[in-house]
């Protein structure tokens, strides 16, 4: 399963202004599916913030 995380920053040069926001409510079957949705959300939020979308493969939830 793929976990989508948005890195939302107030400043592009200050890492202390960044907050990672995962979406644990929805896991994706493919990286492409995750990237499409995460990038759409990142573009919508990027008017006020600097946003980067990341997708990570995880097997944590499969072990439960």
Image: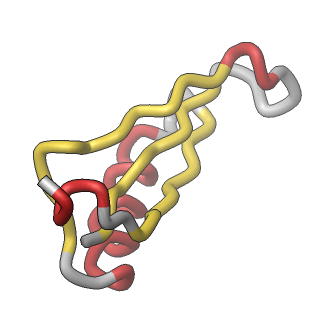
Image quadrant where residue 10 sits: top right
Please tell me which residue lies in front, 21 or 2.
2
Q: Which quarter of the rendering shows the N terminus?
A: bottom left
Q: Say whether residue 46 is left or right of residue 16.
A: left
Give the vertical position of 15 relative to 4 (above or below): above
Please tell me which residue lies in front, 46 or 21.
21
Where is residue 40? Give x, y as percent. Answer: 34, 61
Where is residue 5? Give x, y as percent. Answer: 42, 48
Give the vertical position of 58 relative to 41 (above or below): below
Where is residue 43? Give x, y as percent. Answer: 44, 53
Q: Residue at x 87, y 28 (%)?
A: 13
Image quadrant where residue 21 sits: top left
Q: Say whether residue 17 is left or right of residue 49.
A: right
User: Outermost residue toward the top?
Assistant: 16
Please tell me which residue lies in front, 17 or 64.
64
User: Outermost residue toward the front?
Assistant: 63
Q: Residue at x 57, y 50 (%)?
A: 52
Where is residue 54? Give x, y as percent. Answer: 51, 58
Q: Residue at x 50, y 55 (%)?
A: 53
Total numbered circles: 0
Q: Residue at x 50, y 32 (%)?
A: 20
Give the vertical position of 11 relative to 31 (above or below): above
């Amino acid at each position: 399963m793929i976990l989508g995380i948005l890195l939302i920053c107030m400043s592009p040069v200050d890492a202390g202004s960044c907050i990672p926001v995962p979406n644990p409510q929805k896991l994706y079957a493919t990286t492409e599916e995750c990237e499409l949705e995460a990038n759409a959300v990142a573009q919508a939020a990027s008017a006020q913030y600097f946003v980067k979308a990341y997708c990570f493969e995880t097997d944590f939830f499969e072990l439960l």
